[in-house]
Image (spheres, rainbow, N blue to C red):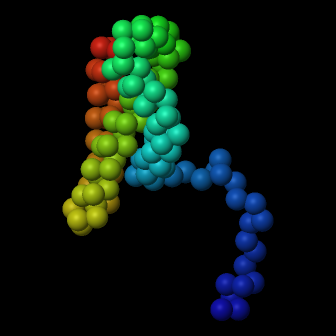
């Protein structure tokens, strides 16, 4: 106990020097995408309501969604949803003790990134 107490610990954690493994990056992106989806939920509900309302509200929906910045925001939200979904499936499998080995966990984190980005590009082409 005395040996560990005498070690000098860093006073400030240097976040730029920490190199996370890929499963850690996927985990952090899962949290960020979930928070982004939650915070943009009112916007998404408003867009959904405007798209299904009267013809006038559909016109306002079309004008908002037609703007390039809105398309870029929707593309980011689409990635957030797809990444959150794919990473959620991965974490469910990990909770069922499937793919806990180091090599399998790394491969599944690569698969999450590849699948979510590929689906985002495919759906983004349809959006744009």
Left-right relation of 39 to 74: right
How many labels were placed on the picture?
Answer: 0
Nearest the eye: 28 or 46? 46
Measured as percent of width and height from the top left, residue 35 is found at 50, 45
Q: Residue furthest front?
A: 54
Measured as percent of width and height from the top left, residue 108 is found at 28, 49
The answer to whether any part of residue 37 appears in the image is: yes
Left-right relation of 49 to 17: left
Nearest the eye: 59 or 122? 59
Q: Residue at x 53, y 15 (%)?
A: 69
Q: Residue at x 75, y 84 (%)?
A: 6
Q: What quarter of the picture does the C terminus occupy?
A: top left
* 107, above or below 53, in the image: below
Q: Residue at x 70, y 92 (%)?
A: 2
- The answer to which quarter of the image holds residue 84 is top left
Q: Residue at x 33, y 20 (%)?
A: 52
Left-right relation of 112 to 59: left
Nearest the eye: 48 or 77? 48
Measured as percent of width and height from the top left, residue 13 is found at 70, 59
Q: What quarter of the picture does the N terminus occupy?
A: bottom right
* 4, above or below 21, in the image: below
The answer to whether any part of residue 75 appears in the image is: no
């Amino acid at each position: 106990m005395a040996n560990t107490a005498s070690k000098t610990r860093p006073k400030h954690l240097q976040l730029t020097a920490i190199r996370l493994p890929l499963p850690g990056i996927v985990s952090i992106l899962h949290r960020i995408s979930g928070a982004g989806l939650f915070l943009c939920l009112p916007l998404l509900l408003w867009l959904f309501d405007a798209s299904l309302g009267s013809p006038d509200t559909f016109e306002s929906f079309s004008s908002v969604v037609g703007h390039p910045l809105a398309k870029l925001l929707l593309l980011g939200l689409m990635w957030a949803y797809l990444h959150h979904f794919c990473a959620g499936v991965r974490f469910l499998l990990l909770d069922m003790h499937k793919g806990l080995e180091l090599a399998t966990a790394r491969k599944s984190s690569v698969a999450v990134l590849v699948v979510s980005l590929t689906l985002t590009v495919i759906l983004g082409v349809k959006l744009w």
